[in-house]
Image (cartoon, helix red, strand yellow):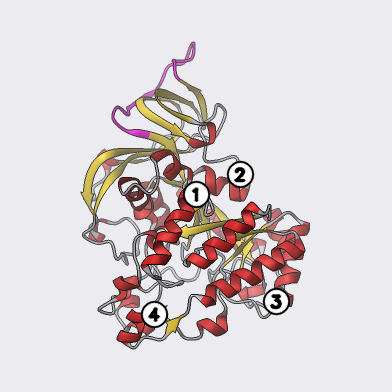
Amino acid sequence: MSHPGNISITGGRLIDPANGIDEISDLHISGEQVLAIGDLPPGFEPDTTIDASGKVVCPGLIDLAANLREPGQENKATIASETVAAARGGITTLICSPDTDPAIDTPAVWELIRRRAKACAQARVLACGALTEGLGGEHLSEMAALQAAGCVAVGNANRPLANTLVERRALEYAATFGLTVFLRSQDPHLKSDGCAHEGAVAARLGLPGIPSAAESVAVARDLALAEHTGARVHFRSLSTAAAATMVGEAKHGQLLVSADVAAHQLHLTEMDVDGFDSLCHVDPPLRTLGDREALRRAVADGSIGVICSDHQPHEEDAKQAPFPETAPGISGLETLLPLTLRLVDEGVLDLATAIARLTVGPAGVLGLPLGELGRGRTADICIFDPAAVWTLDPAGMASAGRNTPFAGWEFRGRVTHTLFNGRVVYDHTQDPRP
């Protein structure tokens, strides 16, 4: 890893949706900041020059949902392993979910994570603090203390809240401090012990199903409480057409709401669970083709303004049991950009919009001055070759979790360099992996 110095990135296609830039231009970095775009500034002498001819230069990606497993589940992954995977995927900022062990419900737990991430220095790790003590869903956490310690949002991960009164109080508390609340909207009673979408495939395989209504009922409730409390709410990992429609209408109605979708939900459907493929066991489950198409439209029109990885690395054994007993989740950091670029190839998004959903979109949810390349901004940069064709081999992944259903998929577009805080933290020419 290099130290910050003077770096010039030359000849690349600079795409910065936040500032409406899409042009062939040079980018100059001094220390940890962007110094200039275009001509070489007077007196500036680069220590390093990166030739980006034929490549795209864009802000470093921001992932709103990454489970780093540390502390508590280091058998699955560590902050060190996953931040290396993030750098390899062009991701410079990660929001870690609060369901560590112990949960991020006190400043002390967040401080532990922050220190370890800072020591790794591969990516910026920020935290979504716990909404309730121990994520138990009953007693509110000390949100003000978590915010003061640096948590950028609060949420209860995928754990249910005890009842709507607890949710109301939590949203009121968060609204008082201007905190964004991350909600995973799923009615626990309708979900019950389901593990796949309630539909034809689950019925044929004999798997307990999760109806679409488990999400749409919960989203309707959450929207009503968001309106009542005035809280800023971000809907995490939507999976159904109905939910996307409701959130889109609420945004047009001026509610302080936003939403994201996991990249895998934009490509896979319930049909991929056929054959009891546990690598496709995710929560929320893969839905119908109609849901997938509706989610794609919502991403295109901005109803859903963020694409995330919903990164859930697991050890191999976690996916070896019978389907209902396997751990849900996909290791998604290294496929976030390629899956998003695939939407460009398929005509769902143009390239600038695709990059916006990974940069300025998530930065806007958090109200952070990231995800753009303006002068004086932090030099977090992703450079990728849009023409590079490659095939995903799980054995070559940097993440400690190799649990991906995309093994053998051919992708177009590969990260060549990642710069974090003005340092080159990933250089494809130095990568020993295939």
Specify which label sits upstream in the sequence, 3 or 4: 3
Residue at 66%, 65% (x, y): give it: 223
Structural crowding at the residue carrying mark 4, measured as other residues with C-alpha within 10 Å and reported as few (<14), some (14–19) or many (≥20): some
Provide the residue span drawn in magenta. 38-56
Q: Amino acid at mark 1?
A: Asp
Specify which label sits upstream in the sequence, 4 or 1: 4
Q: Please state, as top left, top right, bottom left or bottom right, where the N terminus lies in the image.
A: top left
* Numbered circle sitting on residue 199: 4
Q: Is residue 195 magenta?
A: no
Q: Height in image: 122 above or below 378?
A: below
Residue at 66%, 80% (x, y): give it: 162
Residue highlighted by disc 3: 164
413 relative to 221 in the view: left or right:
left
In space, the residues marked 3 and 2 are separated at their CA atoms by 30 Å
Specify which label sits upstream in the sequence, 2 or 1: 1
**Label 1 with label 3: CB-CB less than 8 Å:** no
Of circles 2 and 1, the one toward us is: 1
Judged from the image, the secondary structure of the residue bearing numbered disc 2 is loop
Q: Amino acid at mark 2?
A: Leu
Q: Is residue 43 magenta?
A: yes
Task: Give the quarter of the image for residue 257.
Answer: bottom right
Look at the magenta stretch and give its main secondary structure: loop
Q: Nearer the viewer, residue 327 or 285?
A: 285
Residue highlighted by disc 1: 301
Residue highlighted by disc 2: 368
Specify which label sits upstream in the sequence, 1 or 3: 3
Counting from the top left corner in percent of width and height, residue 44 is at 46, 16
267 relative to 303 in the view: left or right:
left
